[in-house]
């Protein structure tokens, strides 16, 4: 097993991890950023970014490419699409093993593993992903021209995307598990005012079925228990995010009831020398701006930690 | 019309036919520069080093020449970008729709083309 030694290992290359890489690299701290997927995290999955201060309008891909370039220019090593096979966060020296070939060691680690779109996890969902089930209205909306679709969810993303999808679909039904929405009032009003949109409340989907494409859904009214079938061409799912912390469940890191990493304002976890940043952390708002803030704080405190040793 | 990625591209129908004729193992990702497509291009770029026996290419979904992929029987029913198609000796051996993880892609590469 090859051993690679750094001052800080950052696990996760989204906005938080890249920012940490930029700050650490610029401070001449030997740093590697490891990501189990593409560099950029959720940022890459964002089509258009219009509210990142100082940048008029960009795409998630462009912004993440610039962050990656910046981090590299300051000497930060970056490895994408790696497979983490072991984590040891306790003790003076932490280690992350990649595959069966390389172990990365450092006195400090920043966990910036991010989050991912939540799935319904019901029968048929995996089978019909890309065959009628989508998680991206911008990407797949035009496949549903003049078709009837369901949008699952009741937050801002669900309602805003439902309105956007009326540009293509003949009819959009918003299906939500509660009897009220979590979205901002203006988003709810806009959806309610749209003649192409109707609503099924207090219900959730229990099964997807079809042939080569999705054809129908079975859903259940959570108040009455009654089940219904609905013929449908497509379903877009926007039911929030969950933290990517599966690999941390037996690592000694404190997680809350939603499996998010618990941390102080200094981004310190319950384990000395282990910091966290971004969407994997327990916090109220998950934005690129808040991830960048977390990444900065985690990096500066990781530097203070290794300098104090 | 080609995608602004670091992969080699398939620009025309003739080029598509040439690639399938000249390479035993081919993976083509047909998409746009959207959030579900970019991660797949990145994964393919990473895998090029390890899977030297596979020819990795992308193709712009909106190019008129992309009908060669859009209209494949194996892509019937696909309603999510990108369309990822795997060819062995010019024949389609697997096709998937929408974003894929590295593990999902390597599973198909290993199964169809050998590790």
Image (tube, coloured by chain):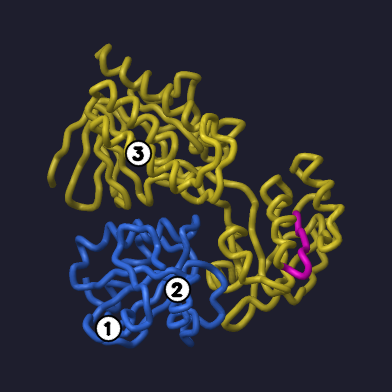
Chain colours: A yellow, B blue
Magenta segment range?
A169-176
Q: Specify the subunit that label 2 lies on.
A: B
Quadrant in the picture for the C terminus of chain B: bottom left
Which image quarter: residue A231? bottom right
- Residue A173 is inside the magenta segment: yes
Q: Is residue A210 above or below residue A239?
A: below
- Do the residues indicated by labels 1 and 3 lie within the same chain of the protein? no
Query: CA gap, disc 2 to disc 3?
Result: 29 Å
Horizontal relation, residue A77 to residue A203: left or right: left
Identify the residue under disc 2: B96
Identify the residue under disc 1: B18
- Do the residues indicated by labels 2 and 1 lie within the same chain of the protein? yes
Where's residue B114, x and y in %? 22, 75
Which image quarter: residue B48? bottom left
Q: Is residue B53 above or below residue A279?
A: below
**Residue shown at 27% from the left, 72% from the top:** B110
**Secondary structure category for the residue under label 1:** helix
């Amino acid at each position: 097993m090859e051993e690679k030694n750094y001052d800080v290992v950052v696990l996760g290359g989204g906005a938080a991890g890249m920012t940490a890489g930029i700050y650490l690299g610029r401070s001449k701290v030997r740093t590697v950023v490891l990501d189990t997927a593409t560099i950029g995290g959720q940022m890459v999955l964002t089509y258009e970014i219009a509210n990142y201060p100082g940048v008029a309008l960009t795409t998630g891909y462009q912004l993440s490419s610039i962050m990656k370039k910046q981090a590299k220019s300051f000497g930060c090593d970056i490895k994408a699409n790696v497979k983490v096979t072991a984590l040891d966060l306790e003790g003076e020296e932490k280690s992350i093993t990649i595959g069966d070939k390389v172990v990365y060691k450092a006195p400090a680690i920043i966990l910036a593993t991010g989050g991912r779109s939540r799935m319904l996890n019901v029968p048929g969902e995996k089978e019909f992903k890309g065959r009628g089930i989508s998680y991206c209205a911008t990407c797949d909306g035009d496949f549903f021209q003049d078709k009837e679709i369901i949008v699952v969810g009741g937050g801002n993303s669900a309602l805003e995307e439902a309105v956007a999808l009326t540009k293509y679909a003949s009819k959009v039904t918003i299906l939500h598990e509660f009897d009220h929405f979590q979205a901002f009032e203006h988003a709810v009003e806009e959806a309610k005012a749209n003649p192409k949109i109707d609503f099924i409340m207090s219900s959730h989907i229990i099964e997807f079925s079809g042939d080569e494409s999705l054809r129908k859904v079975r859903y259940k009214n959570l108040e009455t228990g009654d089940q219904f079938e609905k013929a449908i061409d497509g379903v877009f799912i926007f039911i929030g995010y969950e933290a990517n912390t599966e690999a941390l469940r037996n690592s000694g890191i404190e997680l809350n009831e939603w499996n998010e990493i618990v941390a102080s304002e200094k981004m310190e976890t319950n384990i000395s020398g282990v910091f966290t940043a971004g969407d994997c952390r327990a916090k109220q708002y998950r934005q690129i701006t808040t991830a960048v803030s977390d990444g900065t704080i985690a990096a500066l405190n990781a530097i203070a930690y290794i300098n104090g040793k | 019309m080609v995608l602004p990625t670091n992969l080699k591209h398939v620009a025309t129908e003739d080029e598509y036919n040439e690639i399938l004729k000249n390479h035993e193992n081919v993976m083509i990702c047909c998409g746009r520069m959207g959030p579900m497509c970019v991660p797949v291009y990145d994964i393919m770029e990473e895998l090029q080093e390890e899977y030297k026996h596979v020819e990795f290419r992308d193709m712009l979904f909106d190019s008129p020449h992309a009908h060669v992929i859009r209209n494949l029987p194996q892509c019937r029913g696909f309603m999510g970008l990108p369309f990822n198609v795997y060819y062995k000796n010019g024949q389609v051996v697997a096709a998937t729709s929408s974003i894929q993880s590295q593990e999902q892609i390597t599973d198909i590469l290993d199964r169809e083309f050998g590790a």
